[in-house]
Amino acid sequence: MTVTSEDGVAAAVRRLVADLTAARRWEVHPDPTGRLVALVAGPRYPRRPHRAAELLRHGGFGAFDRTRRRVAGGPEPVLRLTVHDPAAARDTCGGVRTLTAPDWSPDGRRLAGVGPWLRPWLADPDTGGCDTLAVPVTRSLLGLRDRDFRSTWCDDSGGLVTLRDASRRHLTDRRFDTVDDGAWPSPVVADWYDAARADLVRAVPGGDPEVLAEGVVVVTMTPSPDRRHVLLAECADPGELTELLHGDTARHRVYRLDGDAVPWDLGNLRRGSLRWAAPSLLAFCDVDGDRAEFWAAEPHADPYRIGVHRGPVTDWLPAAPDLVYVLGPDRLTAVGKRPATTITPPESPVGLRRHGDGVLVDLVGPADAPGAMSVRLDGDRLAVAGRWPAGVTPFPHGWELDLRERDARLSRDGVRVRARTVGPRPRVATVESGEVAGVRYRLFRDPSADVADRPVVVCLTPVAGGPATSEHRPTGAPERREPAPATPQWSYLPSCAVLTVTCPLRWDERTGFEELRARLRDGLTGVLDAVSDRIDPAATALYGHSFGAACAAVLLADTGDLFRCAVLRNGAYNRTLTPAGFQTERRSLWRAPDVYDGFTVVRAADRITAPVLLVQGTADLNGATTVAQARGFYDALRTAGARARLLLVRDEGHVFATADGIGAAVAEELSWIHRWTGYPATAVRERS
């Protein structure tokens, strides 16, 4: 069946929304003993919430709405929890609804999380019972900027530990009104401090909560392995919050969960420099340039030195009282009482996780390369204990989750336990890749269509990088690949071909705007020349997101009629509103005025002749890419006589996360692209 372009766009959007809502989120959480496994399932792309968020303030730590509660970076889909017992072949806790991943108690007999209306819950897998506590968890956490921040977890005695809004939130000490700082105005710091104050409490079903710490701003919260202590990075007044904003340092304290002992005050330390090494032992990492020194101490005891690592530190993980694994850009080192030993992973290492008696190294490489490897200390040397391909997540006690296919598989010791469909319908594309003068590109197209019969969307992605080293690399042989869902190359197929362009920009203290603009212009035109025999140069559209949108706007003002139209998502178009820096620019507005003026594209609106569609999420928490930026650029374009359209997508953040929001944006974008690229009557095949 062939239909016109307009009908084809509508059908493509309907298919896209159906695929997004069908995509499932499936998480696996084995208990510490390996006896049970918690399965969490729900929509990967939820529907748009009905209640709109009204943002009052933006900043590096987030935004607050009219109730002074922190606005989350996206909607919170309700997930369904199931606990599976493979030995008894039964499921329990099937009626538990949760917003967060569950947390197991050390003995594997209870698990906790946060449910709808931010109510903590505590479940017993053996009986299937679940208790919901009346005290809601706070949403005003500065720590929510960390993806691994957990606000609710089980202790060792049948209760749970959580954070609630400070009981005396609005009784701010008047002494703090005098806080003043040149970079962070005192009203902003005072508002953030008051809005983010929380109480650390321990609660049990049917009992009154016990307050362990009252009225502090919690930056990070880490329980000890035995769940008898908790390490808090906190700010007790706006002055300490100012130090956190300036230097990423906070006061660290250790609280006993029985509440009998005085908290162990460790002083002001860099966030992330302390980690638990044993049930009651903390390890400390002191980094000085390319030298890292590791110490350990028990509560209220003198510290002792574990060892020294020379070289950059990407990640580190204490594994024993006298052993720390240190990850660098290209090697893993064991530092401790014994002589340091090193192993080189086969691909780029990016992170460390505990795994049995060793450590799991997450790797990044080609699709057919290993995705993780386990390493343990064998005598005085490091030995590889296992390897897993990309897409396979190993857990202790033989559990593995395979997400390489559309149907995910959970297995234990090689025996399949569960399977579930998690991905949308496959959308295979033919991909041609290449490189021109250091600029990498990939051309995605529908295998059943000729690229010359489709508009081409050029997606620009600027990245930090050095000078180009190669002049030209021939295009590689085409390969079939499935693009990641919700990306432009996934959303725009099959009605458009997509050309992704990754342009490295060298950026240092001497870089000027003309150099950056020339690099963008020469890199993009070089790629278009390299693929000119496989696309229709007269039917190209330019796409950019975030900083890529600003760079795309710079090119629109510089390249004239090279593109028939443009789509810009969530960009910043007036850099005088961000005078302290942006992206990789660390100089202020007054030290690099030409760079700030060059990326203030509202001043170049009169030189833009291509029609521009501006797409902006109204709940964008990025302090630079606000609705005001999109409205200002839209007003400038219309005043200059350019053809422009502004789409504000309700309740979407910097990256669109709901099926409705993605569908609304793609519908407008495809209609805009087909309208201006001269393909209004092109036949688009609707595939089932």
Image: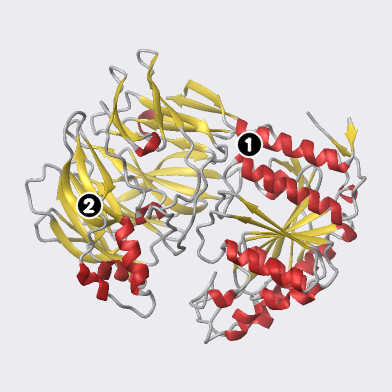
Query: Which marked residue is nearer to the observer: mark 2 or mark 1?
Result: 1
Q: Residue 627, how many percent across, how many down?
A: 59, 61
Q: Is residue 602 visible?
A: yes
Q: Residue 322, how many percent across, how many down?
A: 21, 53
Tell which residue pokes out farthest to the right in this image. Answer: 681
Image quadrant where one finds the C terminus:
top right
What's under tag 1, amino acid-wise? Leu
Which sits earlier in the primary sequence, circle 2 or circle 1? 1
Name the mark on residue 231.
2
Q: Nearer the viewer, residue 22 or 524?
A: 22
Residue 110, by quadrant, is top left
Q: Residue 432, how many percent across, how many down?
A: 77, 51
* Helix, strand or loop at mark 1: helix
Image quadrant where one finds the N terminus:
top right
Which residue is depicted at the point 59% across and 49% down? 650
Which residue is depicted at the point 81% across and 61% down? 565
Q: Residues within 10 Å of mark 2 (few under 14, many from 20)?
A: many
Which residue is depicted at the point 48% across and 57% down? 55
Q: Is residue 65 above or below residue 354?
A: below
* Helix, strand or loop at mark 2: strand
